[in-house]
Structure formats: structure tokens, C-alpha cells
Image (tube, helix red, strand yellow):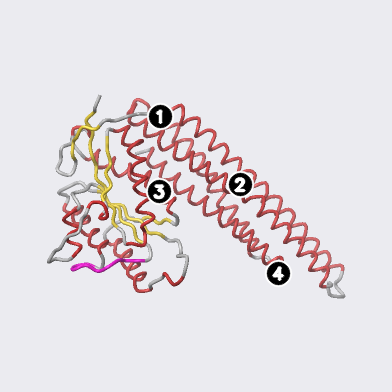
Amino acid sequence: MPELVSKYRIFLASPSDLMEEREAIDEVVSELNNTYGLSNNIVLELLKWEKNSAPGISLDGIQSIINTDIPKYDLFIGLLWMRFGTPTESFGSGTEEEFEIAYKRYISNEEPIQILFYFKKSPPQSLDNINIEQLSKVRVFKESLKSKNVFTWNFNLKEELEKYLRTHIPSRISILVSNSKLPAALKVESNIESKNYEITEDDELGILDYQEIIEVSFHSSMQAIIRISEATTWIGTEIHQKTNEIERLVIDNSNKPIGFKIQRNLYKRIANIMDDFAIRIEPDISIYKSNFEQGIDSYSKLVNIYKSDFGNKNDEEIKEASNALEILMPQIDYGIKSMTAFLGSIENLPRMSKELNNAKKNAANKLKELINKLEFSQSIAIELHKNINQ
């Protein structure tokens, strides 16, 4: 039977250098409609100039056409990377003008609206793609947001942005829902349309399914971290032994220098150890990442079901989910600190031979990759923990 649901519109603003991210957000919104939206009688609609505007002409400039074509929305998402965009009649770029329109609505407090702004931090594939003037404008604009009390977020990869939005969009939409005096399903305010939508639940996973996915995923990710830790302990012991061997040679040959052949052999053995270490941890980094992300996504969906299907009657289950994350987060933090310390010890090894230098670089790159993934995991876990306890 059809159900009455509320539609919330999301407007996406960004320059042309973030087309990949713009397309990815379509998939995120579609996924949220099948999870968060379905559970809360909410439909999310993504507005973008490329699908909600049309060719036209205006005495006030091209941007005014887009501003007129885009209907009123509830959530503004802004993205910037290296390009600030093309100037408009009144602002430094279309993205800036679109943000200012949303910000003006927010401070006027006449209509409920939420704002999310993200900055991509990863470097381009080529230095030729960097326009210093454009990049400088992005930095100035980012600084200006601080004076407006806009809390921005950074990301490196499209996949990171997707995972942030899976948590951030429901969090901000929930604020809009809670700030209304009427239940979500009865809203008829000017920026929220009440319409009949047919909600289907084909192949929808339930609480038991998500619990099983969480258990298996987190177990697999933690086992991967254990194996990486064991490999780290192993290489630390091996390097320590080789260092002691070098020190003994120095003492035994205090009256004469150690031969180059002996030195090269020792450092080559250390290089081989570091290469073995990099080979050992590479598959486990991928195993950790994929399983942790699957577990976190399932956690987010599980909590949404708890909150929507049981409300305040299921506080114990929600608290249990929160406690599980509280146990997990210190483990991630410990992993970040221990791997960062070990990375420092590798980078501090002297540059004695080309074999050693290449092995240092290889092992350091793998550790940096792991640390980045752990830091990303930590930020996602923190965001989800906040969402659980709202």
C-alpha cells in the first residue's frame, strides 16, 4: 500500500574539476533512499545544474539562469578542489554564489536549511593541471568559511567522500526533521513536498543480516591488523638483530675499517627483510580496508533500522552498537600511533646503498598507505559514533 513520505532536496555545487565526485553522489543518494529514506519515510532528491537547468539567456548572466532553474532545497553540498570556477556577475565563481545563496537562507532563519562543504586534498595526476591563481582563490575562500562558522571536511578519494556522505547526509536531514514541529510524514512546508510514493522492500537486508555482516567483516579486518602487527614485530626484531651485528663488527674492527663488501652484504640483507615485510603486509592492507568499510556501512544501516523501526524502545541495542565502536576506536588509534612510530624508525635508517634506499622507500610507502587507511577508518568510526548517539 502506498505510504505518505517527505521529500528532501539536496543541491550539489562544485566546479568542473570534480565531475567524478558529482556522479558518485548520485549513487550515494540513491543508496540512501533505499536505506535511510526507506526506514524513515523520506525521499531524497539530488539537484544539479546539469540535470535541473536548461539552456537559456539572461541579462543578469548565465549563473542567474541556473539560480532560477534550481528549485528550493533543504541541504546544500559544496565541493572544491583545485579550481574555484568561473566568475559570475557578483561573485568569484558560480560555486561561491551558490554557497552565498544557501548561507543567506541559513542566517535569515526563515527556512530550515543545512550546509555541508568538502575540500578535496589529493594532488593532481600532473603538475600541469595546477592553476596557482585558481588554487589561491580556493584557499582564500576556505579561510573565509571559518568566519562564517562553517565547519568544513577534507577528503582525498571519491570513495572517502561517498562514505562520509552516507553518514553526514542522514545526520543533517535528521536535524531538519527534528527541528520541525510536525512528524516527518506530515510535513507540507514550502521546501518539503508531501507526495505519495510506492515504497518497495525487495531484497532488503534486516537486522540479523547486518549483524552477521558486521561480525564477519570486523573479525576479518582485525585479523588483518593482527597479521600486520605480527609482521611489524618480526621486521623490528630482524632489523634490531642486524643493527647489533653491525655494532659488533664496529667493536671487533675498532682498529681498522669494515670492508665495503661486508657492509654491503649486511645492508642488502636488511633491504631484503624490508622488501619481505612490504610483500607480507600488502594483501592484508586491502583485506583490512574492504572488510572494515563493509562493517562500518552495515553498522550505519543497522543503527538506522534500530532508530526508525524501534525508536526509543530499542535503546539497549543502540547503546550496544555504540559500545562496540568505543572499543574499536582505541584499537585503531593504537594502530595509527604504533605504525607511525615504526615508519619513523624506517625513515631514519641511513642511506647506505641503493638496495637499502629502495627497500626503505617501498616499506615506507606501504606503511603510509596503511596509516592513511587507519586514519580514514578512525574518522568514519568517529562520525558513526556521533550519529549513533544523536
Specify which label sits upstream in the sequence, 2 or 4: 2
Was residue 87 drawn as part of the magenta stretch in this picture? yes
- Disc 1 to disc 4, C-alpha distance: 56 Å
Was residue 210 drawn as part of the magenta stretch in this picture? no
Specify which label sits upstream in the sequence, 2 or 1: 1
Q: How many numbered marks, from 0 up?
A: 4
Residue matched to label 3? 162
Residue matched to label 1? 203
- Which one is in front, 127 or 301? 127
In which quadrant will I find the N terminus?
A: top left
In which quadrant will I find the C terminus?
A: top left
- Around disc 2, counting alpha carbons within 10 Å, would you say few (fewer than 14), some (14 to 19), or many (20 or more)? many
Amino acid carrying mark 4 in the image? Lys
Amino acid carrying mark 3 in the image? Glu
* Secondary structure under the numbered disc 3 in the rendered image: helix
The quadrant in which residue 194 appears is top left
* Secondary structure under the numbered disc 1 in the rendered image: loop
- Which one is in front, 118 or 199? 199
Query: At 53% from the left edge and 38% from the top edge, which residue is drawn?
Result: 218
Q: Does residue 372 appear to the left or right of 344 in the view shown?
A: left
- Disc 2 to disc 3, C-alpha distance: 23 Å
Specify which label sits upstream in the sequence, 2 or 3: 3
Residue matched to label 4? 354
Q: Does residue 142 appear to the left or right of 298 in the view shown?
A: left
Residue 284's tag is 2
- Disc 3 to disc 1, C-alpha distance: 22 Å
Q: Which residues are magenta?
A: 83-91
Q: Are marks 1 and 4 in contact (CB under 8 Å)?
A: no
Against 77, is 296 above or below? above
- Disc 4 to disc 3, C-alpha distance: 40 Å
Residue 28's tag is none
Amino acid carrying mark 1 in the image? Asp
